[in-house]
Image (cartoon, rainbow, N blue to C red):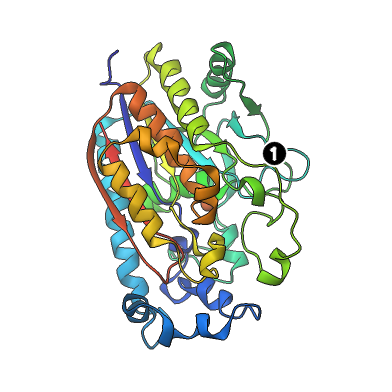
Amino acid sequence: MTTSRFMALGMTHYPMLAGTDEHMAGLLRWTLRDEAIPEEEKDPANWSERMRAEWGTDEGRSAAAGHRRALVDGLRRCRAELDAFAPDHVVVWGDDQYENFREEVVPPFCVLAYGDLEVPAFEVMNERGSPNQWGLPEDSTVVLHGDAARAQELADGLIRRGFDMAYSYRKRAGAHFPHAILNTQLFLDYDNAGAKLPYRLLPVTVNCYGQHAIARKGGLARFADIEEESLDPSGPTPRRCMELGAAIARHFAERDQRVAFVASSSWSHAFLADRLWHIRPDVEADQRLYALMLADDYEALEEVTTAEIVEAGQHEILNWYCMWGAVRELGLARQWSTMVTTEVFNSDKPFAVYR
Ligand SMILES: [Fe+2]
């Protein structure tokens, strides 16, 4: 099987990166107003030295610039590799966070066969009360580059090889476009807020939020509400996500397109890590999985259970599992990776490039 037509990337779609430094730690500031969280947990005197240093004397405002620099470095490196490879298509695995898919239907995986689509660029930032960091008007739009025919072909190819795949021809009316996909275009073209990315995306949504998809309406919840929540059915298992990545890789192996596979997400999220009171991400759990990634130990990675992932607030890592499935199937090798860790800015953010 030839692998020269393929590459893979892992990157963040961290919404606050689209906002300003002033608002980057806004989520933690919001969490600290949750009355159900014990006072001692909220007291910086009880935080790690490293977390106190990030929080500083201005609630994370100064540290935000350094966090942004590290993320933009990683994104620029991913973009340079993508440009050097020059793909025909970019398959993006991203979570749908109570955006396109709500109570009506939640598919485990879904191919978005949309073609070009003009969508609001900054809805999430607008709702959080943060200006976008590019200083563009609040109601700016961006044209997401799709390819409806190739996406349809992908869904058909998967079903024919025994992987039952949902597909969508039209975004739900009034819905936010899934920010995991939207921000992938914005951030891969960080210097132009997504306006000049020349590549066509083939988005595949992943139900990363699983038991919390409807229960927490895509994420943020107060502990008082969590006590009464009724959990939804689980999302796909890590192993199944790897199987999907492998099936998509086999689909393209039979064709002649040059394809880049992109996992779009950060790993542990503070707002999903119940056992850490939503105050910080589970850095230790992320480091354990990152070590497995560095060892290319896919057998150990696919043995991780949904329960372990949910407990660590790593729901969105399922996007990476899809990518690893393709990487393993195609025999791609890791060229570079790094993990930007933080305790104040919600999530740890790994980057990786495979060729
Ligand atoms: Fe997300």
Within the image, what quadrant is residue 220 found in? Answer: bottom right
Q: Is residue 284 above or below residue 247?
A: below
- Give SS at disc 1: loop
Which residue is located at x 56 percent, y 44 percent? 208
Residue 102 placement (x, y as % from top left): 72, 45
Specify the amino acid type for callout 1.
Val
Q: Residue 298: which quarter of the image?
A: top left
Residue 149 at x, y percent in the picture: 55, 20
Which residue sits at x=37%, y=72%?
Answer: 64
Q: Can the viewer see residue 202?
A: no
Question: Callout 1: 10 Å neighbours few (<14), some, many (20+)?
Answer: many
According to the picture, the residue beneath numbered tag 1 turns out to be 106
Q: Is residue 106 visible?
A: yes
Q: Report the residue at 57% width, 14% height from top.
A: 162
The quarter of the rendered structure image containing the N terminus is top left
Looking at the rendered structure, the number of numbered marks drawn on it comes to 1
Residue 74: percent from left, percent from top: 29, 52
Q: For residue 215, which quarter of the picture?
A: bottom right
Could you tell whether 285 is left or right of 26 in the image?
Answer: left
